Amino acid sequence: IRIESSSVEASGSGIVIDDAGTVLTNAHVISGTDGLSSAITVQFHDGASVPAQLVGSFPDQDVAIVRTVEPHQSTPAELGSSEALTVGEDVIAIGNALNLGAQPSVTRGIVSALNRTLAAENVVLENLIQTDAAINPGNSGGALVNSYGQVVGVNTAIINNSQSLGFALSIDSVKPLIEEILAGRGDVDGDSPFLGVTTLDVQSQQSDVLARYGVVTDHGAFVTSVTAGTAAANAGMQPGDVIVRVDGQQVESNIDVGTIIRGFDAGDSVEIVVERRGREMTLNATLGRRGG
């Protein structure tokens, strides 16, 4: 996938998921596109280059989908399941490593760890697959496949100055986001509602961290950071708060927060209930706009 505009020139990888030219990739691969001045091009394995448009993205989950303006004959990838992955299992990373040419690069490795959490590109990504398969710049958005050729992850990050340390979004966490985007609920023009918090599942936090903040609840989204000047900051949200309800809907995990917020528009006022040191508080946040 190539991105060209007056301010952005980048490349990455993608995964064909249907016969209509729909391609799954990372949101950071297409970041900076505005649907007007940016040109997205999908280059297929046979060398054909086809213009594409952004269908939608979830920047906070680093997932995006583009679609070619006209179908191109290409066999869709088989999306498998990451649930059955085990540490030590063989995997293969496929992608446009270093933008070296039309043919994808293929590297082999193993699953080094599961359910990793990583802070990257101003977001916190969870349920990541760690692999020692070489993942280089340009691989982002490409497939991590198992020995059956099924996609089990979407290559998303490498740790600079490290050896054999790459990460992929688990395909089981990506599948629901694909459905959301294809249903028209993804961000297209940076106009999606923005709360301004980074969260993790409360159950993923160490007991000493929960004790430090006096957390009592066993469900919700634990706030790790609040961006200054955003809806969350203006509403009084603080690191260490646990979001337990949004608009009256119970929050079981951090993913629920984004799912509920995406049902609103920028400028809407939303009631958010947080637990702070064992006591519930109701905050009212006026949602901002992701594009600024």
Image (tube, grey):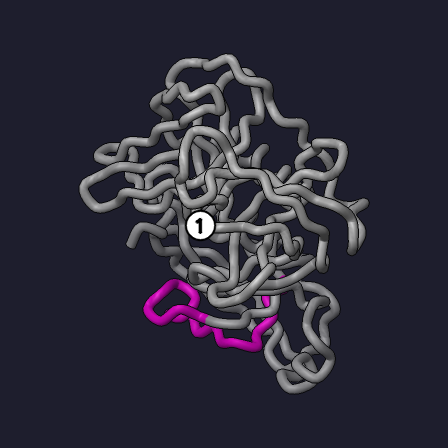
Magenta span covers which residues?
A: 226-244
Q: Which residue is mark 1?
A: 137
Query: In the image shown, does 106 or 230 lie closer to the viewer?
Result: 106
User: Which residue is most to the left?
Assistant: 6
Residue 37 point in image, percent of width and height: 21, 35
- Vertical arrangement, residue 117 with respect to residue 170, above or below: below
Can you say whether 11 is above or below 159 in the image?
above
Measured as percent of width and height from the top left, residue 112 is found at 71, 58
243 falls in the magenta region:
yes
Point out the image quarter for the N terminus.
Answer: top left
**Any part of residue 190 in sight:** yes
Question: Along the line of sight, which residue is nearer the eye, 181 or 18?
Answer: 18
Magenta highlight on residue 194: no
Q: Nearer the viewer, residue 188 or 247?
A: 188
Q: Residue at x 70, y 31 (%)?
A: 149
- Residue 187 spot, x, y in % from top left: 41, 41
SS for dot 1: loop
Q: Is residue 214 above or below residue 167?
A: below
